[in-house]
Amino acid sequence: MKKLGLCVGRHEIPQVREYIFPNELDPLDLEGMEQQAKSKLAGASELILYVTGLTVALICVVNVCRELNIKLTLMHYNRDNGEYYPQEVK
């Protein structure tokens, strides 16, 4: 199981040390983002992903997880209590 953040620098996430997208992204380069996600997720069977708000990057990761048959759980931030809560992608 991998536990990763989506994009570095968008939010402070103490639960993760690694991100799928550790640098600035071109939101128009969907193929490049999917290739980067595939590289980062190689060999994974399950991913817990801390969402950081860049929708186009999130959809690229969802597409890659579906393609590679990786079980995906998204962790969303709750502003009211400062904690994350899970959402399983089916």
Image (spheres, helix red, strand yellow):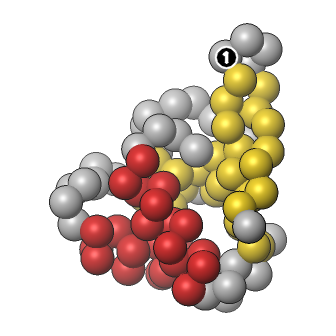
Q: Is residue 82 shown above or below 13?
A: above
The structure residue drawn at horizontal position 75% and vertical position 73%, both measured from the top left corner, is: 71
Say what amino acid the circle numbered 1 marks: Arg
Residue 77 in sight: yes
Is 37 placed left or right of 50 in the picture? left
Residue 83 or 17: which is nearer the viewer?
83
Please give the residue where the numbered disc 1 appears in the rendered image: 79
How far across and how far down the image is residue 24, in percent? Answer: 28, 50
The image quarter in which residue 56 lies: bottom left
Q: Quadrant of the C terminus?
A: bottom right
Q: How many marks?
A: 1
Residue 22 in sight: no
How far across and how far down the image is residue 5, in percent? Answer: 59, 50
Q: Is residue 68 shown above or below 19?
A: below
Seen as rendered, the residue at the extreme front is 90
How far across and how far down the image is residue 32, in percent? Answer: 28, 74
